[in-house]
Image (spheres, grey):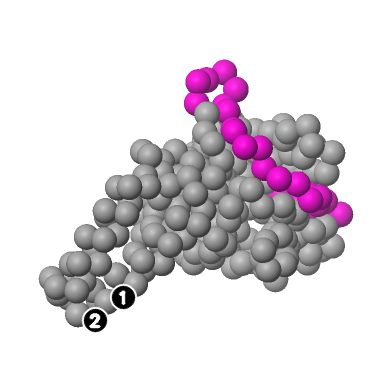
Amino acid sequence: MLLAIADVLNVDELAECRQVMAAAEWTDGNATSGAQAALAKQNRQLPEEGAAAVQLSRLVLQALARSPLFVAAALPARIYPPLFNRYGLGEHFGTHVDNAVRARRGTDFRIRTDLSATLFLVEPEEYDGGELVIEGQFGEQKVKLPAGHMVLYPSSSLHRVTAVTKGERIASFLWLQSMVRDDGARRLLFELDQTVQKLGGRLGSGDAEVLALTNLYHNLLRRYATP
């Protein structure tokens, strides 16, 4: 399932991101690449353990926690702390697949990567190129969203970032392990949840049919979830 989530960050949070990133030191983006990805990657990244990345990672995690759409779609069990990258003129990331397991160096923290996400931090008109291209069952999807918006997609997807030809593309990216490992089951649960929410808005959460569907949703989640 590929899903765009609007307004994950508000105007003040985006301003804070820009201020912190403008004063930060950036390093070679291959610091977190696997062997295959490193061959295709040309960009820069905030050092993972640096003060700027830690501060902004906390900000993004707080924003995700208050996003009902993100929680409903991802059903997150564990989230790898968000990272931050920038692509300048000519920089790009060739076709690759994300590592199946991400581990933080020097810790016992590791996750299975079920979902990947890109959170855009600059407006589309500020740069040319830099589209996130995700290959799926129905062909390629090109994604270039407004600042503060996020795209969520299966980590198993082949994807790439096209070369920037003007300006700079700046974004946060992350991986997460979902409570529901199977993408098809997760998509069906999400669709059911969204239907329940819409019906509840029209009929009221105490309506008998809404309660029945809510019960069905939670019993299915109980069947599939592995916290």
Is 140 on the left or on the right of 111, as rendered? Answer: right
What's the amino acid at mark 1? Lys
Residue that sits furthest to the top in the current view:
106
What's the amino acid at mark 2? Arg
Q: Assess disc 2: are there few (<14), some (14-19) or many (≥20) residues with their C-alpha within 10 Å of its C-alpha.
A: few
Asked whether the beta carbons under mark 2 and mark 1 sit within 8 Å of each other, the answer is yes
Percent x, y of residue 34: 73, 33
Is 167 on the left or on the right of 108, as rendered? Answer: right
How far is disc 2 from disc 1 in space, using C-alphas?
7 Å
Residue 202 bears which disc, if any? 2
Q: What secondary structure is marked by label 2?
A: helix
What residue sits 75% from the left and 55% below the top? 161
Which of the image's four quarters has the C terminus?
Answer: top left
Q: Quadrant of residue 137?
A: bottom right
What residue sits 37% from the left and 47% below the top? 224
Percent x, y of residue 169: 71, 57
Badge 1 is on which residue?
198
User: Does 207 appear above or below 152?
Assistant: below
Q: What secondary structure is marked by label 1?
A: helix
Q: Nearer the viewer, residue 209 or 50?
A: 209
Is 52 on the left or on the right of 10, as rendered? Answer: right
Residue 20 visible in image: no
From which residue to which does the magenta span run?
Answer: 86-109
Q: Nearer the viewer, residue 140 or 224?
A: 224
What residue sits 54% from the left and 45% below the top? 114
Which of the image's four quarters has the N terminus?
Answer: bottom right
User: Does 46 appear above or below 219?
Assistant: above
Percent x, y of residue 109: 50, 26
Q: Nearer the viewer, residue 40 or 226?
A: 226
Residue 199 visible in image: yes
Percent x, y of residue 125: 70, 71
105 inside magenta stretch: yes
